[in-house]
Amino acid sequence: MSTPPFSYNKSQALFERANKVIPNGIAGHFNPSVQKPAGSYPFYCAQAKGSRFQDVDGNEFIDLMCAYGPMILGYGNSVVDDAFSKQVAIADTCTLASPVMVELAEYLVDLVPMADWATFAKNGADATNMAVLVARAATGRIKTIAIDEGYHGASPWMQSIERSGIGPDDHANVIRIPWNDIAAVEQALADNANNVAAFISSPYHHPVYKDNVLPDEGYWTKVHTLLKQHGVVSICDDVRTGFRIDMKGSSEYFGYKPDLVCFCKALANGYPVSALVGADSLKEAASSTFQTGSFWFSAGPMAAALACLKELNRINAPSLVLETGKKLTDGLIDIARDHGHELIVSGMPSMPYLRTEHETGIEFHQALCGECTRRGVFMASHHNLFISTALSDTDVQRIWDIFGDVLTSLSATS
Ligand SMILES: Cc1ncc(COP(=O)(O)O)c(C=O)c1O
């Protein structure tokens, strides 16, 4: 093995301190029950630039998670960071909104064909919550159809019912149906006649721990015909996919026109802002809903979003990340095959989900991703990866080299 495995002594020490004052030490994906095998992943970042970050122990990683999506242009992108700094020097969180909010709304309305208006918040869940509220206000109905294992944020109605603190009441108005199943859409609409406000879904299905699945031919057209017949609002949750497939929104790529689209992660290359954009027919309903948050007028992230969108557009970022992702994963498939393994890659190449054959359980894949991480390629085993425009050919070659080395060492130990 050309690269010795990293040690995480400082990360571990900090995590132990954190555990005393922060529930679970770190929330979310870094809960030790997710990042397996134990000891494979660091916990704290010291610095980040371009396609790479360093942890507090000084280990350097090529980052295939991009902060779980936001860092589409890589860390410390000067175009976006300069726009943010300039705006913050003038005004950031202020009693009044800043003109940049209007500029950003105008830019999004010009960019995204289905959008006639835009409104802003902080997190993806703010946007999906707002979208559902607007749909309810517009229809006077209460229920939302969502896809089994489709993720739309951490609000109680969106979380899995098995999770701690979530009860049946939270899900009383959510109807879950399987992905790519037109008969299930039909059935859900028939069973809840005149009571469904919204159908919310990502443009393709990207659950965790499972192969990601693109829409079947004609799926979105058929869904939309049904939604129109039943007067149901179509919400595209483009929080994860947004600007990684098509600058006009991922629904354009898949050939359908939702009534509302939620953007977040890649919108501002790491600065906290999300957007809900909508069709004119829902503008009045959107105006009637109550929307606010302590930092929702914060102008720095809006300036960052405007600069980010212009930069993504200028370099045609979706095609770059799709191309890099395809090249990277084609190479990984070949390397895995040379080592006697089938690597299955699903979803769009700009956010590919990888899994090695799971017949004997997920442990081999977890070990593979964990060992790659311990040698400098940061990748999760349970979640799709994210490709940034900062990922260079040198990075891709290094990822292939480490991946091959790890497969050799895992074969030798199994
Ligand atoms: C598709 C999708 N929708 C909504 C969200 C929620 O976004 P946030 O975590 O910013 O609230 C996420 C987050 O991962 C997501 O992937």
Image (cartoon, rainbow, N blue to C red):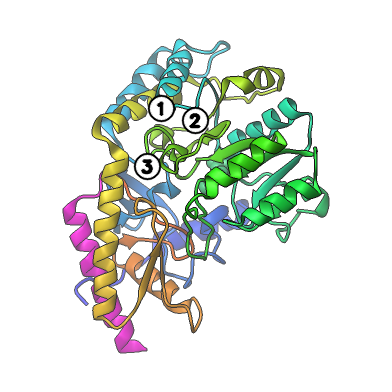
Q: Gap in Å between the C-alphas at discs 2 and 3?
A: 13 Å
Left or right: 133, with 393 as reference point? right
Q: Say whether marks 1 and 2 touch (CB < 8 Å).
A: yes
- Identify the secondary structure beneath mark 1: helix
Residue 273 marker: 2
Q: Residue furthest left?
A: 394
- From the image, tell me which residue sits under label 1: 305
Please tell me in which quadrant of the rendered image residue 227 appears: top right
The reply to whether the residue tagged 1 has its Cβ within 8 angstroms of ligand 1 is no
Crowding around mark 3 (Cα neighbors within 10 Å: few <14, some 14 to 19, many 20+) is: many
Q: Nearer the viewer, residue 231 or 272?
A: 231
Instruction: Please state the horizontal and vertical placement of residue 39, each as a whole percent of the image.
Output: 44, 70
Left or right: 387, with 267 as reference point? left
Q: Which residue is found at the position 37% from the left and 42% from the top?
A: 71
Amino acid residing under circle 2: Val
Q: Say whether marks 3 and 1 touch (CB < 8 Å).
A: no
- From the image, tell me which residue sits under label 3: 71
Asked if the magenta segment contains residue 400, the reply would be yes
Q: Gap in Å between the C-alphas at discs 3 and 1?
A: 12 Å
Crowding around mark 1 (Cα neighbors within 10 Å: few <14, some 14 to 19, many 20+) is: many
Instruction: Please state the horizontal and vertical placement of residue 79, each as a whole percent of the image.
Output: 28, 28
Instruction: Please state the horizontal and vertical placement of residue 2, each as a whole percent of the image.
Output: 19, 73
Asked if the magenta segment contains residue 257, the reply would be no
Please tell me in which quadrant of the rendered image residue 140 appears: top right
Q: In this view, does 59 lie above or below 86?
A: below
For marks 3 and 1 on the same chain, the one whose residue lies earlier in the sequence:
3
Q: In this view, does 413 lie above or below 368?
A: below
Q: Gap in Å between the C-alphas at discs 1 and 2?
A: 8 Å
For marks 2 and 3 on the same chain, the one whose residue lies earlier in the sequence:
3
For marks 1 and 2 on the same chain, the one whose residue lies earlier in the sequence:
2
